[in-house]
Amino acid sequence: MIVPRVVSWLDERLGTNAGARYLLKKVYPDHWSFYLGEFALYFFITLVGTGIWLTFAFDAAGTNAYGSVLELANRAHPIGYVMRQVHHWAAVCFVAAILVHMGRIFFTGAFRKPRELNWMIGFTMLALASFTGFTGYSLPNDNLSGTGLRIAYSVALSIPVIGRWAASVFNGGDTFPGPLLTTHLYTLHVYYLPIAIATLLAVHLFLVIYQKHTQFVRDPRVVVGRRFWPDYALRTIAVLGSTAAVLALLATFVEINPIEAYGPYHPWIATNGAVPDWYTAFLEGALRLGPATEIKIFGHPIPPVFWPGLVLPLLVFLFLLAWPFIEQRITRDLAWHDVLDTPTQVPLRVGVGTALIFDGLLLTLAAADDQTSAALHLRLETLVWVYRVLLLVGPFIAGALAARIAAELRARIRESAVYPSDATTIVRNEQGGFEEEEPQPA
Amino acid sequence: MKVAFFLALTIAGALGATVAAALGVEPAIFSGALVVAFVGLAGAAASAAIALHAPDDLTEPRVQRGPSAPSPLPDEAVSRGTFGKLWFAAIGAFAVLGLVPVISLARKPGRRSVTGWRAGVRLVDAENKPIARDRLVNGGIETVFPQDGIELPDAPAVLIRVPPYLLPAAGNAPAAAAAPDGYLAFSKICTHAGCPVALYRHESHELYCPCHQSRFDVLNGAKNLSGPAPRPLPRLAIGVDAEGYLIASGDFDAPVGPDDWDRRL
């Protein structure tokens, strides 16, 4: 057989068998929530695979970007149609999978010492994945994404002092759309961003192996689980197969981003009710709720898009990036943690997480405020004010409520562990059977 | 047995997809075969894992990786004190130097507004046809461009015709003077984020941006009424030439599109 010969050929020269044996026999703990990150991994692999194919079909020079994608949107081109649809579906699912995976890490406290670094790497990958998604969604130069790019260009312009530089590096010209815009987006989308993600992914996975996986309460001195080969490998192949099957199903039966319906980009055409891919919707919502005031510093204007379009996402990003250290500051807990928390056991984290999710959902919802106000027969201005108040007050109420519920749950479990209220005593009788002891009168 | 069944599905699905691709059939058939292949793979792996009955009880000791023991080797003289600081300063100097190529990528001012509007330029539609003075009825709206300048980035304007008697009543004197037959024109590029202000509500005489819902009062110089737009839409004064076509009487009365740091108002 060829495989054993190749293996021993390599081992003779590089001594690879020891390492391979270590990796194949490595023990992984098993829990359904540990597979969430793997979904993200397989979405990424699908994206790279379909993406490489798409580079051969796309007109990257930008002169006929729309036309070259339109050909793929045609169902008479079955491979191109499925490739493009799978690619777009995988992109929106990729960001979703990372977010859900990070939710698991956050609520179980898996980011605590010694794994703060991997949390930051993971969070950077989430930001990069969203940015990659946005650049890819903008590549076909259709009217929907072109309008989105125009907004992004305005946000880049709004940066104090360096706005024009930043916008022009991105736009590749002095007027929008710049002559190099598509080329810049293409380079970002195809080279820099995916290579950055792949590099961080390699470090991320290496650290998971090197530091070993966290685990729900069992013996803290050991990892308890199954071997990589064949037990865990079979499970992860099942995850891969089901991910790919779901993507193929979605790609064929639920059309995503029908650029043939949007038409090519023209700066003077826009349609009502247009919404971007879901992971950028919170920014769109923030732009809708943002104030109209343009403040001036020494006569220089700071356009209103600066605050919701740039400052807000930057603050959220920095806050989440720094969360392991913020939590350490609050709890003064610098101990080594290989054992996960049950999510409901830590009221602080439940409260902060709920507050963030509340605002994220609210901003996403606000991205459709025109449709919502029409459906509810509300004046749009009224709805905007309701959202603004909810955005500022809501997270405190929702967070406090969630933290309170978590605290009560924790107290109940602690109480029942010390002296369960419905406790009875079981005694063994002389015949070897068990019987319940009569409760003693107090 | 189960594993064999699922692997057979995988083989059938993968070969089916290959044949479908070769024949160039509907995407649904190609993709359906792919689904069968992947379901087969997932099913085979899952049933093999179940068949293994591997107990979840193997253990592997955890190792605390840090901190490292101090190195027995002595520190070199070059990494101490002033030398160390100088090394960092040298690296920092290279970082500053690195800014030069980054900044050189963008040419200041890095933004140009090309509207194409001058006094006497005819208004045209998206087919570059001039607009006669009887083009719109009251309440009508059309996107207009300077003649031969449809692709100019800051050119698009909205032409609206309102009943002329509404204009003096609004108390906006220059509006009436520069609105022949009740024609008004405003930049179509929103002052908020540059979206096209594409929608017009003729009962309330409001322009409405579909991106972020800014409203502008057409009878009052396209003043921003609500929404995130910080200032009115720039106005294009128009007139009528000898042949009865609409012309611009100059450029927009304010800069087009969103502001930035270097655009002083």
Image (cartoon, rainbow, N blue to C red):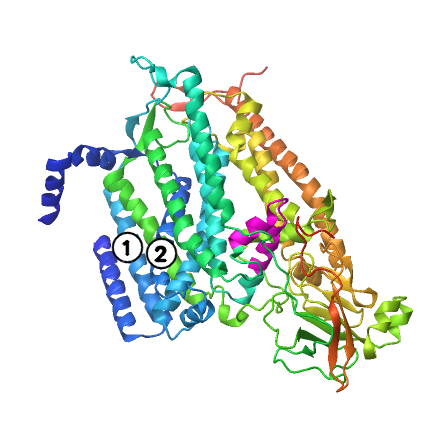
Q: For the C terminus of chain A, give its image quadrant.
A: top right
Which amino acid, mark 2?
Answer: Ala
Q: Which chain is disc 2 placed on?
A: A
For the residues bearing labels 2 and 1, Cβ distance under 8 angstroms: yes
Could you tell whether B51 is left or right of A15 in the image?
right
- Local SS, label 2: helix
Which amino acid, mark 1?
Answer: Leu
Residue drawn at x 34%, y 66% is: B32
- Residue B116 appears in which quarter of the rendering? bottom right
Which percent across, then down, holds residue B245? 74, 83
- Local SS, label 1: helix
Mark 2 residue crowding within 10 angstroms, few (<14) / some (14–19) / many (20+): many
Q: Which chain is disc 1 placed on?
A: B
From the image, state whether disc 2 or disc 1 is nearer to you: 2
Q: Which residues are magenta?
A: A148-170
Whether callout 2 and callout 1 share a subunit is answered no
Residue drawn at x 58%, y 59% is: A150
- Residue A211 appears in which quarter of the rendering? top left
* Measured Cα–Cα span from mark 2 to mark 1: 10 Å
The residue that label 1 is drawn on is B41
Q: Is A198 part of what is drawn in magenta?
A: no
The answer to whether any part of residue A340 appears in the image is no
Q: Is A158 part of what is drawn in magenta?
A: yes
Q: Main secondary structure of the magenta part?
A: helix
Could you tell whether B42 is left or right of A135 in the image?
left
Residue drawn at x 42%, y 41% is: A33
The residue that label 2 is drawn on is A244
